[in-house]
Image (cartoon, coloured by chain):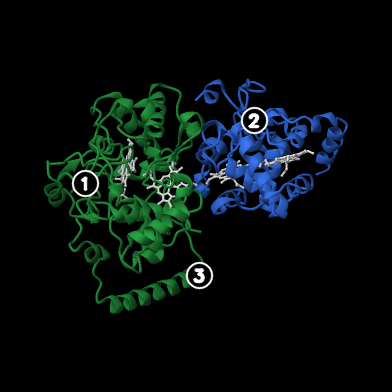
Amino acid sequence: MTKPAIKKPAMNRPVLMVMAGCALLAIAAWLLAMVLTGGPEDYAERYAGQSAPDDSASAAGAMSSSPRPSASASSASPSSSESGQAAAPASAPATAAPPRSAIPDNEFGELVRQGERIFADPGQFASDWVGNDLSCQNCHFDAGRYDKTASLRSAWPMYPAYRSKNQHVNDFAERLQGCFTYSMNGKAPPRDGEVIQALQAYSFWLAKGMPTGEAPDVRGYPDVGDPPEPPSFARGETVFQEHCALCHGDDGQGQKAAGGAPGFPPLWGPRSYNWGAGMHRVNTAAAFIKAAMPLGKPDVTDQQAWDVALFINSHERPQDPRFTGSVQDTAERFHQHQGQYGKTVNGQVLGEHSPPSGTVP
Amino acid sequence: MARWFVVLGLCLLFPSAFAQSPDGAPAAAGSCVACHGAEGQGSGAFPHLAGLGEAYLRRQLDAFASGERVNAIMKPIASGLSESQRQAVAGYFSGLEMAPTEAAGGPPPDGPGRTLAVHGRWQQDLPACVQCHGPGGQGIGEDFPPLAGQPAAYLEDQLKAWRAGNRPAGPQGLMGHIAERLDDDDLKAVAAYFAALPAATAEAGDD
């Protein structure tokens, strides 16, 4: 089982021996892979033709923005050999977020609850700032609690942090604003308004017991292994039809539940995340899909995850909010990473026919 | 199982129920109303069929007939229908709507059943039931049947059937994979929760 990252305090001898054996095997496999591929260069570089600037908050290291050759061996499990040797922290970090029932019955607790409501259903509780049919928890499961999908408790203690995306140090409020602008294709709510305040209170409360400024074992989406073959649109389409369309629809537009309530979210098109969102990056989407899709039974291979990530991100979606008036210029300035924006797919330049961004109600 | 034979016996006491075929219904649907209710609204321990997805209904009839979904009552009935009759009754029942009802006994029970249904158990990678079965268990599209208002014993039997290998795991093996990870207490609690929800609410009815 791949359980995320909680540090195991004590290990007995046979377990250690097996782990040492695995580590040796992994090293051998990595060496072999280096020989076969001609060197340890990042897959990102081969695929995108340039080094991909990392958009993750700089200190983290555990973010999964670019696949590392050896990381696949240990994907979600704590980097086994290392954690055995690492000096135990003075007090172990909390192994889980506190239960919902522990939210206090006072004004602070009410703000925490409001934060959870907004996170689970921003279209209803923060509608002024939302320009698509998604919710925060579509990509951060269980209202931001699930450790494998960029949990809030793993993010909160890591801010303020420098982000290459906007080239300055962001505090948590600004990080949250970015999610509204890009993932939610909306507008940034004011920092001192109720929406950001409630989301901060909620994240703070979830992060109880997490050491400030210490990179948590699991953050962002777990690493996905390198694809044996470069990702392919055609194979991705097949993966999509066989593993995803049941829920997200043949046209990727999702499905409403009975009575028009939110059902399965759209993966592209005018009601999905825009061309500035983290999920439009093929590597980020591949990591998410490998960890979490199909819902409840994430059983696609690394190769399939990359193929289908490329496929879903080769369709039009709302424009990048930083659009300068020219797709080529916007691509050069903001898309030096593993994304399809500005690339030609099936004779169309992606970004040329994007619906406008940020059209909130 | 014994329970079903008792109910079957009761049905046979009312042969008139078999005779009537609702207006506009395919002839084959006439024999269903005895157990599944006029207009497919369900009755007693029998599940309702109205408003379930056509593809879903068809798949169940095929599975009863082939024996992959094990059920002594439905097997002969489904086997007795031709391919086109199965398609016709599936289309017919999926086109009917559940009549709006008040929640049977007040608001649904709070507790572990609700928690599993609404939040899942993600520490064990288990999604919430409502993520696939829709808010309020009202179903999503053709393939994700509504659970709200189905009889508790029926829902529990289905979850047990998956664990025992007596029902096909369903599209992409999703549901079988979920049921395998539930224990007896989970089944009871979550079945009771969905059974207590109204099958149709006034808003859900008129869309």
Residue carrying label 1:
A351
Residues packed near mark 3 inside 10 Å, few (<14), some (14 to 19) or many (20 plus):
few
Query: Element type at marker 2?
Result: loop
**Label 1 element class:** loop
- Image quarter of residue A26: bottom left
Q: What is the distance, in whole Å, between disc 1 and disc 3 at their CAs?
A: 56 Å
* Pointer 3 chain: A
Kindly identify which residue carries mark 3: A13
| Quadrant of image for the C terminus of chain A | top left
Q: Nearer the viewer, mark 3 or mark 2?
A: 2
Q: Give left or right: position of A301 versus A258.
A: left
Task: Assign a secondary structure to mark 3.
Answer: helix
Placement of A150 over or under A18, stated as above or below: above
Q: Residues within 10 Å of mark 1 (few under 14, many from 20)?
A: many
In the rendered picture, chain A carries what hue?
green
**Distance of mark 3 from mark 2, alpha carbons?**
53 Å
Q: Looking at the rendering, which quadrant does residue B15 occupy?
A: top right
Query: Quick one: label 1 or label 3, which is nearer the N terminus?
Result: 3
Determine the chain carrying the residue at label 1: A
Task: Inspect the image, locate mark 2, and give the three-letter code of the amino acid beneath it.
Answer: Gly
